[in-house]
């Protein structure tokens, strides 16, 4: 689905949703969701893949502005394009 090999992996709690969790799309797992991190920044997350050999589930968590989140929810931006190129929406 996504090639994550070119993304920089950073160990931080910054993009983790700690409160205000809201599921936008669900199918056996929360597929698309948003909430706030511990600093009050808006975060959007998406279920990406599962690696059953580890076992491990992969998710994208991306910091977004309230305006960008609103545009994604209203369909003005497509979520696939956003997740592949999030810096284009800054």
Image (cartoon, rainbow, N blue to C red):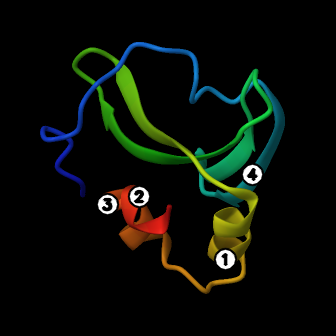
Query: Label 2: how many residues lie within 10 Å, few (<14), some (14-19) or many (20+)?
Result: some
Residue at 49 percent of width and 69 percent of height: 79
Q: Earlier in the sequence, mark 4 or mark 1?
A: 4
Which label's residue is closer to the chain start, 4 or 3?
Answer: 4
Instruction: Give the distance between the C-alpha atoms of the residues marked 3 and 2, in whole angstroms.
Output: 6 Å
Q: Which residue is mark 1?
A: 71
Quadrant where the N terminus lies?
Answer: bottom left
The answer to whether residue 29 is above or below residue 24 is above
CA neighbours of label 3 inside 10 A, class few (<14), some (14 to 19), many (20+):
few
Disc sitting over residue 23 in the figure: 4
Q: Secondary structure at mark 4?
A: strand
**In the displayed structure image, the side of residue 5 where residue 8 appears, left or right:** right
In the picture, measured across the screen, residue 79 lies left or right of residue 35, that is left
SS state under label 1:
helix
Question: Viewer-nearest of labels 3 and 2?
Answer: 2
**Tag 2 or tag 1, which sits nearer the N-term?**
1
Instruction: From the image, tell me which residue sits under label 3.
Output: 84
- CB atoms at circles 3 and 2 under 8 Å apart? yes
For label 2, the residue is 86
Q: Residue at x 60, y 86 (%)?
A: 76
């Amino acid at each position: 689905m996504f090639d994550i090999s070119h993304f920089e992996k950073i160990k931080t709690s910054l993009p983790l949703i700690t409160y205000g969790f809201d599921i936008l799309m669900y199918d056996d797992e929360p597929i698309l969701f948003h909430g706030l991190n511990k600093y009050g920044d808006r975060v959007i997350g998406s279920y990406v893949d599962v690696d059953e050999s580890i076992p491990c589930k992969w998710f994208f968590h991306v910091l977004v502005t309230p305006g960008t989140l609103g545009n994604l929810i209203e369909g003005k931006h497509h979520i696939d394009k956003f997740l592949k190129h999030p810096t284009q929406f800054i």
